[in-house]
Amino acid sequence: MEMTPVISSTVAARGYDPETEKLRIRFHTGNTYEYSNVTQEEYNSISSAVSVGAKLKSIVESKEYVKI
């Protein structure tokens, strides 16, 4: 999955696979997580948010995830 750098105080990069609805987030801490069942609409809202970290938190708090 291709990762795109993000200007954010918490998120370093993001990636998305629309076929599997997986969202991958790399934080500035170096930790990377993959979230399941993230819709294209949810991903787009993260991508266009003024505060990426806040929008991400509101979307993924109910999603399953794994640390990569």
Image (cartoon, grey):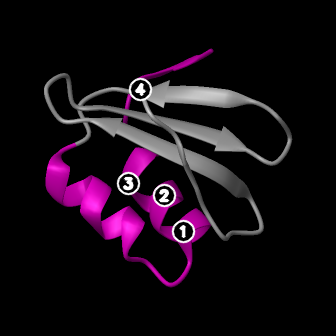
Q: Residue at x 40, y 24 (%)?
A: 64
Q: Which mark is residue 61?
A: none
In the rendered structure, the answer to whether residue 15 lies left or right of residue 57 reads: left
- Nearest-to-viewer mark from 4 and 3: 4
Q: Three-letter amino acid code at disc 1?
A: Val
Instruction: Find out whether the residues at labels 2 and 1 contact each other: C-beta distance under 8 Å.
Output: yes
SS of the residue under disc 2: helix
Between disc 1 and disc 3, whose residue precedes?
1
CA gap between label 1 and label 4 equals 19 Å
- In this figure, which residue is indicated by the disc labeled 3? 59
**Considering only order in the chain, which callout, 2 or 4, is on the residue closer to the N terminus?**
4
In percent of the image, x 74 and y 59: which residue is there? 10
Q: Earlier in the sequence, mark 4 or mark 3?
A: 4
Residue occupying the point 26% across, 63% down:
44
Q: Which residue is mark 1?
A: 52
Residue 56 is labelled as: 2
Residue at the disc numbered 4? 1
Asked if the residues shown at circle 4 and circle 2 are in contact, with their CB atoms under 8 angstroms apart, the answer is: no
Please tell me whether mark 1 sits on a helix, a strand or a loop.
helix
Kindly indicate whether the residue at mark 3 contacts the one at mark 2 (C-beta within 8 angstroms): yes
Amino acid carrying mark 3 in the image: Ile
Which image quarter holds the N terminus?
A: top left
